[in-house]
Amino acid sequence: MSASLSTAPLPARLTRQQLLELYYWMRLTRSLEERLVALHRQGKVVGGLFRSLGQEADAVGSAYALEAGDILSPLIRNLGSMLVKGATPLEVLRQYMARAQSPTAGRELNIHFNDLARGFLGQVSALGAMVPVMAGIALSFKMTRQPRVGLVYVGDGAMSTGAFHEGINFAAVRRLPLVVICENNGYAYSTPTRLQTAAATLVDKAPGYGIPGVRADGNDVVATYQTTREAVDRARAGEGPTLVELVTYRRKGHAEHDDQRYVPPGEIAEWERRDPIDHHRRRLLESGWATAAEVADVEARVEAELDQALARCLDEPFPDPATALPGVYADPPAAPIEWYRTLRTPDA
Amino acid sequence: MSASLSTAPLPARLTRQQLLELYYWMRLTRSLEERLVALHRQGKVVGGLFRSLGQEADAVGSAYALEAGDILSPLIRNLGSMLVKGATPLEVLRQYMARAQSPTAGRELNIHFNDLARGFLGQVSALGAMVPVMAGIALSFKMTRQPRVGLVYVGDGAMSTGAFHEGINFAAVRRLPLVVICENNGYAYSTPTRLQTAAATLVDKAPGYGIPGVRADGNDVVATYQTTREAVDRARAGEGPTLVELVTYRRKGHAEHDDQRYVPPGEIAEWERRDPIDHHRRRLLESGWATAAEVADVEARVEAELDQALARCLDEPFPDPATALPGVYADPPAAPIEWYRTLRTPDA
Amino acid sequence: MPEITYLEAIRQGLWEEMERDPRVFLLGEDIGALGGPFRVTEGLLERFGEERVIDTPISEQAIVGAAAGAAHMGLRPVCEMQFIDFIACAYDLLTNYVATARYRAGLSTPMVVRGPSGGYVRGGPFHSQCPEAAFLHTPGLKIVCPATARDAKGLIKAAIRDEDPVLFFEHKYLYRRVKEELPVGDVITPIGQARVARDGTDLTVVTWSAIVWKALEAAERLEREDGVSVEVLDLRTLLPLDDAAIVTSVRKTNRVLVAHEDTRTGGVAGEIVARINELCFEWLDAPARRVAAHDVPLPYAPTLEDFVLPQVDDLVAACRWLAAY
Amino acid sequence: MPEITYLEAIRQGLWEEMERDPRVFLLGEDIGALGGPFRVTEGLLERFGEERVIDTPISEQAIVGAAAGAAHMGLRPVCEMQFIDFIACAYDLLTNYVATARYRAGLSTPMVVRGPSGGYVRGGPFHSQCPEAAFLHTPGLKIVCPATARDAKGLIKAAIRDEDPVLFFEHKYLYRRVKEELPVGDVITPIGQARVARDGTDLTVVTWSAIVWKALEAAERLEREDGVSVEVLDLRTLLPLDDAAIVTSVRKTNRVLVAHEDTRTGGVAGEIVARINELCFEWLDAPARRVAAHDVPLPYAPTLEDFVLPQVDDLVAACRWLAAY
Ligand SMILES: Cc1ncc(C[n+]2csc(CCOP(=O)(O)OP(=O)(O)O)c2C)c(N)n1
Ligand SMILES: Cc1ncc(C[n+]2csc(CCOP(=O)(O)OP(=O)(O)O)c2C)c(N)n1
Ligand SMILES: [Mg+2]
Ligand SMILES: [Mg+2]
């Protein structure tokens, strides 16, 4: 019966099911962030909160182009990519709230966590650093003859770092199976892209590395998926890296505390009209790729899952202080406790 | 009378005098290096010896395109550029032999010395580092409204460094009066350019920085001069940086001790046939831009100058040991002598 | 006199130096329209314009390298590292190019690199570092770490006027927590001079930056609860170290604790203890001891961060141990 | 048993580990056809092919970063820095990414970064450095510095087999000057264990790398000329430090000199002296003293380099001072 609904042909060899899934991941991303905003206001988020509002399509669509076994490294705004790769809302909530049971046991913040088995390698703060590291992961795929692909995200700002340059150049020279996604969201913190580079477009950097560069609308989840998918296929076929520029916009500040004083009036509103989730939702319904009921069901499922996750971790404890010491080295097992600390307990 | 000699029109708005001067600088560069080779064999050169054999034209021609007040930063193979900017053979000989009266008083090697008044800033060993530094010098020209230009050399290898990327990007974004010369001499030590980058040509990197890129025959001193001159004029006119690729070849090893085992047979001989000095000499005579007597006179002058310089410094002493301590800071005046050293003199 | 915060003191110092000397300019990421994540440079763009308050690409090597080049030509650049942790990206340029320029090449490089350092703010491993130890080992650099608003202003001014490169490590925990009445206009803290933050006779705590305040709190408790008189020496400058001030205090009290926020192994305290041992061996009634962070990257969770970093109770316990030795 | 040089010992160690374990591979600049400027990797390309002996672009950040990524996936990369001085270009990746990976993210990163360090070879300020101090301050890294051919082989093998990142600082002055009879096959020097290079009773010299040889020479002279019995402790590993070995020796001799080639301020000796002071205070008959290079960038001219760096005469003089204290 659902066949009879279809008015437009399905795009990018995606099934109805997959098109709805893309909607699910974007919805989940946004709603999870909305929950985090509430928690942040209640002081339950320990550190800063970073939003990807308006960028859900580029994160979800690009990650969705990967297969099981492929590995990506996200940026602070790639919550959606993490979720697609199997990170759970529960893990993310625990990370932000620095709970003992968070994936990093409270040692690292927000989405700085990883699971190579599921296919995501958490970033470090230093921008650009993950490009050479992901080149190394792609190198390992090539050396061990595995048909796997690495994908790394860089911002319009991070492309100015030396680490980005050295990493992408290394991957290009070695023809490694690495896809480099540049999320051009118009700003690096307060710095507009024109102060970051004089290049006309960011894909203009590709020829300098002898690799193809392609641009896509980062607010169109299908276009993002399709463009990334072609780059992933190239990489898997042994044809080396591609630089993919996804054009989007960061509608919120760099972090929650950022008042965006530096943004020209009207710019944000302009991009609100191009909201990636509304756009995909409308397309699903208008093209008859999904029914209103299916869409509503997805939305309900998202909220239910988040209620559940939240309920589970809201009252979880912080880590036990002494857990701060183990794990610096495989061996010796733990860093020594400082002499002065042993003096504090009367019985020491 | 010399007018009647002229058969071919003068190139690149250069005078006869200047065309002969270019020959003089190239000849001086090569002969000075030949003297250094002899000294090296006699064990008089303290450290390594780095040749620019076959690259004299790109060094001399590019530096010749600068005006007084402009500043360049050379690479190890830009002896010719240093000489054009006023560094003397005597200084270079003293540097290589680590003499007390060398420009760095024996603290630094070979052509790692500078005189901003004459217009050259000595390099440090870390490749790429001089690009951001020269961007800063160009920035100072722009901020102080001086119509001066900076020029920095990078090798085909050094372009792979993060410092190069960050420096040229910064200069491009700020539209600084900086010319970046890439000397593509085919190798970085033993590494051929194809293992350094997958780019078809090195100027392909220019669009990624939003600046023009131009290529020239680095073995043709006139073409090198002309191409660099246009980039210098652009910079002086406030139109920002240009990336100039000079295609040449490193006919000697990375340093004297390098046996070039990694060079395919015949390659060197092939480039010997394109020797930049022979080529310019032939052109001078065949085009009637200089007489055989003028050329012979230049050659004699070069050797005489070198004899003189050598005679002056050959028996000069090494620096006095205690001169190692002053000058780390403007103040305090000197690093303290270590306690143990004062014990060595019996009367301490 | 108006009371201003540590953060305002830095801004005032920058402001006044830029007014005084047209060669002074700022460069860094997001220091213009934004005024930096902590607003240290707020208002400077409006006052001094885009040419003297330069928003750079995300390129610490370019920031430091360009500053060095401009400094060679007689300008006085002040670089901001958005968080001081990212100074690691410019480590080669700072230690190999900038620090050696005068010695190897006779180049003067009057520049400042400043930025927010330090923990106790739940910043996690990459927004909480104290990079002093990474640069102590570099002849040619100077390192200053103000603990008070007065010194924040006095040292930024001294740093800008210095003929050599100065690393100015401000502590983000102190930005708005520390206030002081300060005169407008020249307040100069000479580089290389420590300050006795509290007089004492029984033992000395040698420290700097945020730990100065913890040491003062510990000292008061020890006075009150144990009748032990603790002298607190605020080094203010770590390179060059003020040996004379350290020696004077240690030879007076004969017991010394060297305390810092950074991890212990390879930290600055090691150098200081070694010097005390060399210069005051005969005067020591107890071994010089160190209080420092545990040897781990700084974790994010409050319980973990508080455990890893030294606290007032730790200083009190260590001082008691020394006093009882 | 064949006698092989320190350099051949490193090559043999690499060779045997690559034969033993297909996960081991090398990456660096000019390590293939050239075999590196000192020929340490000579012959390895021919034996193991381009995939396991990778000539990289001039990109220290890429070398270290790529090695880390490959190590996460179970490979065992060994990076060469053409001269160890250039490790400064990878400082951020090593200290912030590699060193913290296990702690912050549970990632194992078994990799080695090796290269020629040290002076006494007229290399000038950028081809003579000892980078130990720059990394001592980094929990998560290990640092080894072999002085003998046996330890050069034993430590490179141990480093490659270690589950954590290891910095392997070889000394170019020793490459061809030090020879030893070594068995082919497994020679393992456990990381973290010092070695008594010479037994003595009157005082201890704690040192490593090239200075071990100068200390041994000084010890013989002191035995001969002064009848003073000097123990020489070769640390071999700097991170983690072998406190037990240091304590044992110092509690036996009661006098200690810590000597290194690197500059004094902020050098590794400070940390060691601080620990001795903490662990052996009551056993010290004289202050622990340091012999280190003068606090300047290392100059090029022979007369200057010889003046700046510690020499045998300096060790003799310092030991005499300690013995007479
Ligand atoms: C090497 C380095 N320098 C500075 C910073 C501070 N910083 C964090 S995020 C950011 C802006 C990043 O912009 P962009 O790369 O465009 O990513 P976006 O936030 O827009 O997704 C900056 C400057 C950093 N994390 N790393
Ligand atoms: C950052 C850094 N890494 C490695 C080296 C070691 N090194 C010195 S010269 C050289 C090759 C340089 O090649 P290229 O840039 O092409 O210059 P050329 O010698 O060909 O003129 C290398 C790898 C260095 N000096 N700096
Ligand atoms: Mg951005
Ligand atoms: Mg080259």
Image (tube, coloured by chain):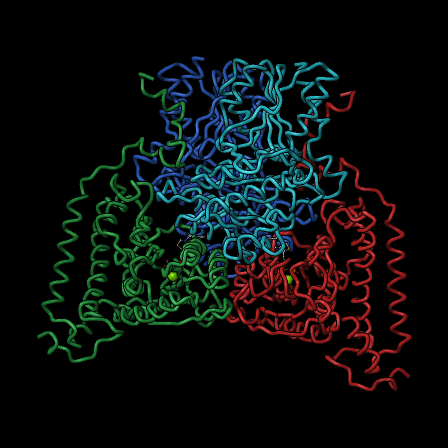
Chain colours: A green, B red, C blue, D cyan
Please provide percent x and percent y for residue A96.
Answer: 27, 47
Q: Residue at x 42, y 51 (%)?
A: D69
Inspect this view and state whether residue C279 appears.
no
Task: Tell me the quarter of the picture where residue B328 sits.
Answer: top right
Ligand 1 image position (quadrant)? bottom left
Q: Quadrant of the C terminus of chain C?
A: top left
Please provide percent x and percent y for residue A230.
Answer: 35, 70
Q: Residue at x 21, y 67 (%)?
A: A18
* In-front residue for pair A302/A133: A133
* Image: D264 above or below A113: above
Q: Is residue D262 left or right of residue A160?
A: right
Please provide percent x and percent y for residue A218.
Answer: 32, 68
* Image: A218 above or below A154: below
Q: Is residue D188 left or right of residue B220?
A: left
Q: Quadrant of the N terminus of chain C?
A: top left
* Image: B344 above or below A228: above
- Figure disc tally: 0
* In-front residue for pair A308/C78: A308
* In-front residue for pair A115/D21: D21
Q: Is residue D298 left or right of residue C252?
A: right
* Image: A343 above or below A302: above
* In-front residue for pair D255/D168: D168
Q: Is residue C33 left or right of residue D254?
A: left
Inspect this view and state whether residue D6 appears.
yes
Which residue is at the far front?
A: D1
Task: Tell me the quarter of the picture where residue B190 sits.
Answer: bottom right
Please provide percent x and percent y for residue D34.
Answer: 63, 54
